[in-house]
């Protein structure tokens, strides 16, 4: 009988919480990953997506100012 790793249930709320927590000054992605049983690379991907969305939002807002 093989043991399967149990995956952490990742809701949108948890994803947002962990992402924002990881962006706080002095935060440690490794510690967050352990606390929530999520891979560091997963959190880093979420951070990347979040930053991209933030920059796209800023660009979209600045584009509207020139209309």
Image (cartoon, grey):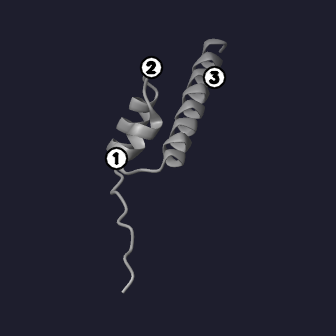
Under circle 2, the secondary element is: loop
Q: Which residue appears at 34% of the width and 57% of the height?
A: 8
Q: CA distance from mark 3 to mark 2?
A: 24 Å
Residue with the mark numbered 1: 36
Of the pair 2 and 11, the residue shown nearer to us: 2
Q: Position of residue 63 (x, y in %)?
A: 65, 19
- State the image quarter where residue 20 is shown: top left
Q: Residue furthest bottom?
A: 1
Q: Which residue appears at 57% of the width and 20% of the height?
A: 61
Position of the C terminus, as image quadrant, is top right
Q: Earlier in the sequence, mark 3 or mark 2?
A: 2
Position of the N terminus, as image quadrant, is bottom left
Residue 28 vertical position relative to residue 24 in the rendered view, above or below:
below
Under circle 3, the secondary element is: helix
Of the pair 49 and 26, the residue shown nearer to us: 26
Q: Earlier in the sequence, mark 3 or mark 1?
A: 1
Under circle 1, the secondary element is: helix
Other-residue count near label 2 (Cα within 10 Å), few / some / many at <14 / 14–19 / ≥20: few
Q: Residue furthest top?
A: 66
Residue 51 vertical position relative to residue 11 in the rendered view, above or below:
above
Number of numbered discs overlaid on the protein picture: 3
Q: Position of residue 6 (x, y in %)?
A: 35, 66
Residue with the mark numbered 3: 59
Residue 5 vertical position relative to residue 27 in the rendered view, above or below:
below
Residue with the mark numbered 2: 25
Of the pair 13 and 44, the residue shown nearer to us: 44
Other-residue count near label 1 (Cα within 10 Å), few / some / many at <14 / 14–19 / ≥20: few
Q: Position of residue 59 (x, y in %)?
A: 63, 22
């Amino acid at each position: 009988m093989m043991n399967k790793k149990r995956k952490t249930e990742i809701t949108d709320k948890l994803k947002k919480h962990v992402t924002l927590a990881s962006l706080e000054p002095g935060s440690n992605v490794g510690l967050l990953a352990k606390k929530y049983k999520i891979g560091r690379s997963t959190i880093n991907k979420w951070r990347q997506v979040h930053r991209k969305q933030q920059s796209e939002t800023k660009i979209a807002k600045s584009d509207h100012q020139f209309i």
